[in-house]
Amino acid sequence: VLSLYSTGRTTGVVLDSGEGVTHSVPVYEGFSLPNGIHRMNMAGEDVTDVFHKLLGLQASQHHFERDKDAALLNELKQELCYVAPDYDEEMTLDAFRIETTYELPDGQSVQIGKERFQATETLFNPNINLGLDMGSERRTTPPSCCVCCCRC
């Protein structure tokens, strides 16, 4: 509720995402609605996995090993990834507007573009097709924000 207050609002949906679980909490006039709270077993660790797979699709980039480079991948995700206000519009932007260069600890540089917001989009649209073979990892849970809004 406090994160909603910090934006000057008393009604909305708060998305609380940790490493292993995400909760969406509907709030009305400053009070959370317990019957509308939705748990989704997709969170930061899953976003990191998707981010890793997206970076792996770049042929000319540094090769990241999930186990060995876990801390580095997590740092990259936390520093560079963001949630696009409008995913479809963000996909149409020119590369120079969204690409950024990150210098790795070994001195190499890696160029990261659309992966910055594609990885986080999986929290809101788990069935999005990013050209990845997600196999059994693919979630069929509806987007948590929509579920909460429908329950309110």
Image (cartoon, helix red, strand yellow):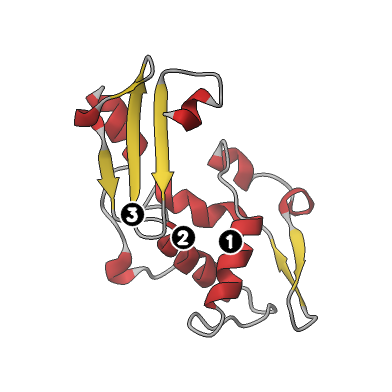
Three-letter amino acid code of the residue under disc 2: Val
Q: Secondary structure at mark 1?
A: helix
Local crowd size for mark 1, using a 10 Å CA cut-off: few (<14), some (14–19), many (≥20): many
Q: Residue at x 35, y 24 (%)?
A: 27
8 shown above or below 40: above
Instruction: Kindly indicate whether the residue at mark 1 contacts the one at mark 3 (C-beta within 8 angstroms).
Output: no
Three-letter amino acid code of the residue under disc 1: Lys
Judge by depth and name the residue closer to the eye, 36 or 31.
Answer: 31
Residue matched to label 3: 21
Judge by depth and name the residue closer to the eye, 97 or 109.
Answer: 109
Q: Earlier in the sequence, mark 3 or mark 1?
A: 3
The residue lying furthest to the front in this view is 2
Residue matched to label 1: 77
150 shown above or below 38: above
Report, in whole angstroms, how far the alpha carbon at label 1 lies from the one at label 2: 8 Å
Judge by depth and name the residue closer to the eye, 57 or 24.
Answer: 24
Q: Residue at x 78, y 80 (%)?
A: 108
Q: Secondary structure at mark 3?
A: loop
Judge by depth and name the residue closer to the eye, 18 or 91.
Answer: 18
Q: Which mark is residue 28?
A: none
Q: Which mark is residue 47?
A: 2
35 shown above or below 61: above
Q: Is residue 57 visible?
A: no
Horizontal side of 147 relative to 88 (left or right) equals left
Q: Quadrant of residue 33?
A: top left
Residue 134 position within the rendered picture, expressed as x and y whole percent measured from the top left: 36, 68
